[in-house]
Image: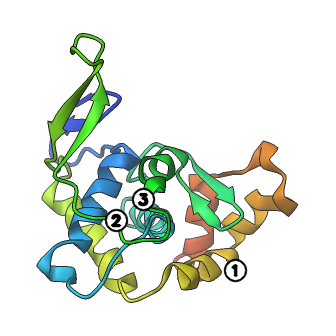
Amino acid sequence: MFSYNRYYTVSVIKEGECMAYKAIDVARYIVNQFNSPRYAGYSVSNMKLQKLLYLVQAFFLIKRDGEPCFDDKIKAWAFGPVVPAVYHEFKCYGNLPIPEIKSYVVPDPSAPMGVRRIRYQSHISADDREIIDAVLDAFKGWSAIELMNLTHDQKPWIDAYADGNSTNDHITNESILKFFKEELHLDES
C-alpha cells in the first residue's frame, strides 16, 4: 500500500510489492545526486536529466519485470525523450547545470500566497536508489548531446516521434521494455 499525492510520494509498502514514484521525485533525487560528492566533477542539465529519466525507466522495467519507476508519460520530443512536467520544472536553467534542491514550492490554496515551501527529502527507497545510482554511474560522463544521440538511435523514440507528429508522441513502457530486452538479448533462452 502507498500514500500518494500530486506533489510527492510517500511509500509504505510490504516486502515484494512494487510502487511507482512521481517522475519529479526521481528527477529531484537525480539532481541532488549530481550535486553530491559522489558525482563531483559531473553535472546534470535539464536535457541530460530527461534522458537519464528515460534510462532509469528502462532499467526499472528490466529489473522489476515490467514495473516502472514512475507513472508519468515519456514523450518523444525533437531532442529525445522528455517527461514534460519535469522539463517545465527545470527549464529555467536552460542548458546550465541544475543546482542542488534544498526545497521546492507546491500549490496550496489554504496558504497565504497560494503556495507553500517544502524542504526536500527523498521518498525513494534504498533499493530503488541503488537502481537509479547504477544508471547514473553508467552515464554520468555522457553529455546531454551524447545521450540525445543515443536515444535518437533507439526504436522507442524513433517510433513515437514519427516525423515530428506530436499527436501520438508517447513512448510507451511496453516499447521501452521490448527494445531493451532485445538490445540486451534478455529474451534468448
The residues tagged by marks 2 and 1 sit, at their Cα atoms, a distance apart of 26 Å
The kind of residue tagged 3 is: Asp
Question: Of marks 3 and 2, which one's residue comes earlier in the chain?
Answer: 3
- In the rendered structure, the answer to whether residue 114 lies left or right of residue 58 reads left
Q: In the image, which is nearer the foreground, mark 3 or mark 1? A: 1
Q: For mark 3, what is the residue? A: 65
Q: Quadrant of residue 111?
A: top left
Where disc 3 sits, the SS reads: loop
The kind of residue tagged 2 is: Ile
| On screen, residue 103 above or below 9 | below
- Furthest residue toward top: 110
The residues tagged by marks 3 and 1 sit, at their Cα atoms, a distance apart of 24 Å
Where disc 1 sits, the SS reads: loop
The kind of residue tagged 1 is: Asp
Residue 2 image position (x, y, % from top left): 23, 32
Q: In the image, which is nearer the foreground, mark 3 or mark 2? A: 2
Q: For mark 2, what is the residue? A: 98
Q: For mark 1, what is the residue? A: 153
Residue 4 image position (x, y, % from top left): 28, 29
Query: Which residue is nearer to you in this view: 159 or 38?
Result: 38
Query: Which residue is nearer to you in this view: 83 or 129?
Result: 83
Mark 3 Cα shell of 10 Å, populated few (<14), some (14-19), many (≥20): few
- The mark tally for this picture is 3
- Residue drawn at 42 percent across, 68 percent down: 59
